[in-house]
Image (cartoon, rainbow, N blue to C red):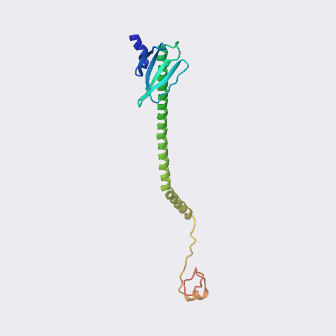
Amino acid sequence: MKELESILEPITGYLKCMNRNTEKGWYELEVGIHKNWVFDENKEIGCEIIAELDEGNLIKIFPKNENVVIDDLILFVEIIIRTNKKIAEKEKQFADKMNEMKKSLEVQASEFYKELDELKENSFKKLNDNFVVELKKETRGRKPKNNVLKISTDESDDKKNDSVNTTGKTNTDTAKIK
């Protein structure tokens, strides 16, 4: 009996029962697998779904000819299990990688929007500060173009110079530009 248990060890947890088909003279296996697992028959071994349950599917594995022995059926179930575990591992790796990429994109987006907000808040302030500094540098070396007005109360000056003030009128009663 120990030898039989060691042979069934790889499919323990999946094997529901082993039946003898007395009409055809071979063994058949009933195996429970996860609902989203894939399987397919080949030209030597057949598969059919016996029951679809919330927890998974119950499938029957059977030979298609008398040359297939129970060891072949057990090996076929092992292949189904191994293949679907590989698929599940690949899906998990992909999901983990997608989560990493999603987190990375969220961080990049956060940094981008932070930088954008800083630009919106500070760009004109910095530009205006720089403009004022540059403007002060330019005006240090040049003289302002303001006209200096001298006010004269002397009437003799009034008669000598009928000048024009900054408004374009003659200055007879107003200050003279000298």
Where is residue 20 shown, x and y percent of the image? 44, 15
Front residue (pair 43, 159) = 43
Q: Which residue is at the far front?
A: 23
Seen at 48% across and 23% down, the residue is 80
Where is residue 160 shown, x and y percent of the image? 61, 87
Seen at 48% across and 52% down, the residue is 117
Seen at 51% across and 60% down, the residue is 128
Labels in figure, total: 0
Instruction: Residue 3: name its quadrant.
Output: top left
- Above or below, 172 against 60 in this view is below
Where is residue 46 shown, x and y percent of the image? 51, 20
Q: Quadrant of the N terminus?
A: top left
Q: Which residue is at the far left?
A: 1
Where is residue 15 shown, x and y percent of the image? 42, 20
Seen at 41% across and 13% down, the residue is 6
Q: Quadrant of the C terminus?
A: bottom right
Instruction: Residue 42: name its quadrant.
Output: top right
- Above or below, 37 against 22 in this view is below
